Amino acid sequence: MRCIFCKQDSSSSRSVEHIMPESIGSKRRVLPRGVVCDKCNNYFGREIEGPLLSHPSMRNVLAWHQVPNKRKKLPSLHGNIGGTDIAVGFRRGRDGKLEIEPEKQLDQKHVAAEWKAGLPNGFIFVVDMDPPKRVMSRFLCKMAIETVAELFAHNDGGTEAMVDDTYFDNIRTYVRYGNNFSEWPYSQRRIYPESTLMRHPDTKKWVPVGFGCTVFVTKRFETLFVFCLYGMEFVLNVGGPSIRGYEEWLEDHGYISPIVERMGCRLVTEGEGKSQRHYLDGDFNVQNGFAFDERHGYRP
């Protein structure tokens, strides 16, 4: 077996590669051992995923939604009080309830019982996904290759054909070494409110719509990758650094989302003002997406 990124022998690799990081809550989308070698896996964690998910923009989103990292620790929320930068830590008390405490020692007037009851008065923070573009693009490209590899893994011969296919050489070099392009453009837009809920596929309870990813094709027969995190949609072209094909796809389909309406879901809004609630109605069925592509004459 060879690694889909560096093409080196990976038969002895032991790393388990999550297509979407555990630190955003992903547990299920896991590639077979050896599809990504230990060396590449460690590199991505150190040079791409770590810097991106620790960036204040991304960290605050995950902290606000109380998403634990792979070590089960809740990320801190960064903001300020009276112009002083501060990190607010979250933890679960013995009774299971969420407790809040400052991560840095402040004046005694700020360290009070109010921390355990909720965010302190005067604490200002921003929850706005605005990641560094280059590291975000490499992060997206990594997930894109791995999502394609997930499809190859179900075929005879597994991912070996993908390793030899030069179609993927530009994007894999950009992810692994970052020395062939200065940037790999991607589209970013909000497709539903951050507080939107969906039915959990197992429990059927209403839960926040956290994350998801898939691939789809355009009339140019380009393979595009889409990733969504709390309503923010990111799309890039697997074959090369251009998103013109996606812009055409949006124009042709009335600006629907390839990961929502294309997959058989729709946004439903109920109520008004502070009582307004948003839901995604549907099952996010990947087969619905492939059927959509077929109806419009696209071939994956």
Image (tube, rainbow, N blue to C red):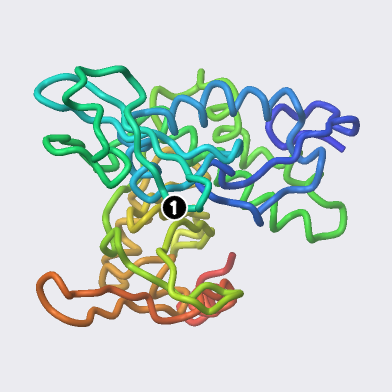
Instruction: From the top left corner, tell me how far across and down residue 130 is, in percent.
Output: 28, 37
Q: Please tell me which residue lies in front, 58 or 187.
A: 58
Instruction: From the top left corner, tell me how far across and down residue 11 is, in percent.
Output: 90, 33
Q: Residue furthest right?
A: 12
Q: For the residue carrying disc 1, how many other residues have a C-alpha within 10 Å: few (<14), some (14-19), or many (20+)? A: few
Residue at point 53%, 47% (across, down): 94
Give the secondary structure at mark 1. loop
Q: Please tell me which residue lies in front, 157 or 77.
A: 77
Vertical arrangement, residue 128 with respect to residue 133, above or below:
below
| Screen quadrant of the C terminus | bottom right
Q: In the figure, residue 278 lies in which quadrant?
A: bottom left
Instruction: From the top left corner, tell me how far across and down residue 54 is, in percent.
Output: 42, 28
Vertical arrangement, residue 245 with respect to residue 273, above or below:
above
Residue at point 51%, 39% (across, down): 141
Instruction: Say how many tags the image has.
Output: 1
Q: Which residue is mark 1?
A: 97
Left or right: 66, with 145 as reference point: left
Left or right: 90, with 214 as reference point: left
Q: Please tell me which residue lies in front, 156 or 266.
A: 266
Residue at point 59%, 28% (across, down): 45
Q: In the figure, residue 125 lies in which quadrant?
A: top left
- The three-letter amino acid code for the residue at tag 1 is Lys
Left or right: 125, with 23 as reference point: left
Vertical arrangement, residue 248 with respect to residue 38, above or below:
below
Q: Please tell me which residue lies in front, 274 or 245.
A: 274
Q: In the figure, residue 106 lies in which quadrant?
A: top left
Instruction: From the top left corner, tell me how far across and down residue 197 is, in percent.
Output: 37, 70
Left or right: 276, with 220 as reference point: left
| Screen quadrant of the N terminus | top right
Residue at point 41%, 63% (across, down): 209
Vertical arrangement, residue 149 with respect to residue 207, above or below:
above
